[in-house]
Image: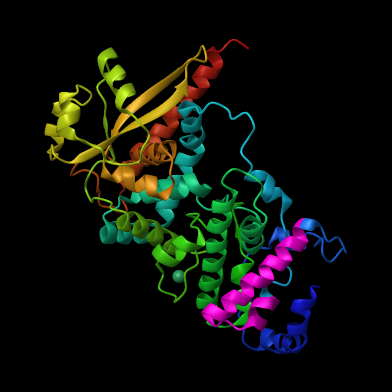
């Protein structure tokens, strides 16, 4: 054990043995696999990286104690077993020869029968919560569901790294990449947000404080069904089930309301489409290739795009859209059969940009939109919001689609020469 921590610990340990029996609720959280892993420090292995993490963490916690007035004993005790995770360091190193991005394979991964079926079950289980979230935020329930589906397969894949380990590793031992300094700073801020969040949620109860810091996350520190980073939890998460705390891992209601609130706070326009189709012609394809720059900013008015010949005026008219409203070009790179690079283009509206704020990738935002459509979302003005009732005609139509999609896949398999 590190000496600077040791000097705080003895009196607290005795206290904790008493409080653990008297006041803390039973721990119902799933067993954390990383907690059973041998701690290199306990085994007497002090790697250079572990030593570096320890000394930086000590300074970090002392600064937090000064600025936030959280008792140093609580911080030291809670972080006494923090581990440097080599696996996390490896996962953030960019590949030396990055594969060409391929929208079609990305789309196939996220818009598949398992995720559609899972989405239907999720909607059926969370009808009331989804309806309330939709009414309050104007975000269609299928879009909320699709985000949770793409992020974690409705809570089935929430990550297996203890969040304090992963954030401390990236905050102090980020690998030597060109953006190392900026990334370290980003993760130090996330670690600080995690401590403040957990301290606030625990209401100074040491057991709850540690349980919060020890919960699992992705290798980047994203938490729960909607994979919020600690800073996003502090800014945008909502206590949906009204039990007085925010639990994005175990409360689907909290997760649903938090996703809806995030999109509302990032400019979601109720009742508006996410994207419009682009004109499919050689001329339009060429123009789109010239003006698409991948910048997540609304740069063109619909009127300009119509004049450039890339947007059919009938869509804007049908939808009753304001021709002065702004849009961006969605360019989705894919590989053709002969490995040639090609693009699918769409016209992205404000709601597309709101999805990009959730995850800065056009592939991500478009797959959320298309998964939501598979779940019955109508990407049209005035039809985007549908009342969610027990009858759920849209869900039934999605079920038919799954059957159809399965049949088509089987057929394709049968037709392919073995
Ligand atoms: Ca709650």
Picture quarter with ligand 1 = bottom left
Rendered residue at 70%/85% (across/down)? 16
Q: Residue at x 50, y 54 (%)?
A: 227
Asked whether 32 or 154 is in front, the reply is 32
The residue at 52%/49% (across/down) is 152
Left or right of residue 409, residue 349 in this image: left
Q: Is residue 365 magenta?
A: no
Instruction: Note whether 182 is above or below 286 in the view shown.
Output: below
| Residue 212 location (% of width, % of height) | 59, 70
Q: Compare residues 293 and 9 and report the one nearer the observer.
A: 293
State whether the magenta stretch is mostly helix, strand or loop: helix
Q: Residue 320: percent from the left, percent from the top?
A: 12, 38
Q: Residue at x 51, y 71 (%)?
A: 197
Query: Is residue 326 placed above or below 66 in the rendered structure?
Result: above
Image: 372 above or below 131: above
Position of 408 compared to 29: left or right?
left
């Amino acid at each position: 054990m590190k000496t600077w921590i040791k000097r705080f610990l003895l009196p607290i340990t005795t206290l904790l043995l008493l409080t653990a029996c008297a006041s803390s609720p039973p721990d119902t959280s799933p067993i954390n696999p990383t907690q059973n892993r041998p701690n290199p420090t306990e085994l007497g292995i002090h790697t250079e990286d572990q030593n570096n993490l320890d000394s930086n963490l000590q300074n970090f916690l002392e600064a937090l104690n000064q600025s936030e007035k959280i008792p140093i004993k609580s911080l030291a005790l809670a972080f006494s077993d923090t581990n440097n995770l080599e696996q996390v360091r490896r996962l953030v190193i960019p590949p030396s020869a990055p594969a060409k991005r391929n929208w079609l394979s990305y789309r196939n991964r996220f818009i598949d029968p398992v995720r559609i079926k899972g989405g239907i079950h999720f909607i059926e289980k969370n009808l009331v919560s989804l309806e309330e979230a939709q009414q309050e935020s104007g975000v269609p329930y299928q879009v909320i569901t699709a985000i949770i589906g793409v992020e974690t397969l409705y809570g089935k894949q929430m990550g297996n790294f203890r969040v304090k380990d992963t954030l401390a590793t990236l905050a102090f031992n980020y690998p030597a990449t060109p953006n190392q300094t900026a990334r370290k700073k980003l993760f130090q801020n996330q670690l600080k947000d995690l401590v403040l969040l957990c301290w606030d949620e625990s209401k100074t109860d040491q057991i709850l404080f540690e349980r919060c810091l020890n919960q699992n996350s992705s290798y980047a520190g994203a938490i729960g069904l909607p994979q919020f980073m600690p800073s996003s939890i502090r800014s945008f998460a909502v206590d949906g089930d009204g039990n007085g705390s925010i639990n994005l891992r175990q409360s689907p209601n909290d997760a649903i309301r938090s996703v809806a609130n995030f999109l509302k706070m990032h400019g979601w326009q109720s009742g508006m489409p996410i994207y419009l189709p682009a004109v499919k012609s050689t001329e339009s394809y060429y123009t789109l290739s010239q003006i698409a720059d991948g910048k997540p900013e609304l740069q063109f008015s619909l009127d300009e795009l119509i004049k450039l010949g890339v947007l059919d005026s009938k869509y804007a008219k049908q939808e009753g859209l304001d021709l002065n409203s702004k849009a961006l070009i969605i360019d989705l790179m894919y590989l053709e059969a002969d490995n040639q690079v090609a693009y699918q283009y769409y016209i992205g509206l404000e709601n597309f940009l709101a999805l990009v704020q959730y995850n800065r990738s056009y592939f991500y935002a478009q797959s959320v939109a298309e998964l939501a459509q598979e779940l019955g979302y109508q990407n049209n003005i005035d039809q985007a919001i549908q009342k969610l009732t027990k009858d759920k005609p849209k869900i039934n139509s999605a079920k038919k689609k799954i059957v159809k999609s399965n049949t088509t896949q089987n057929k394709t398999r049968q037709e392919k020469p073995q």
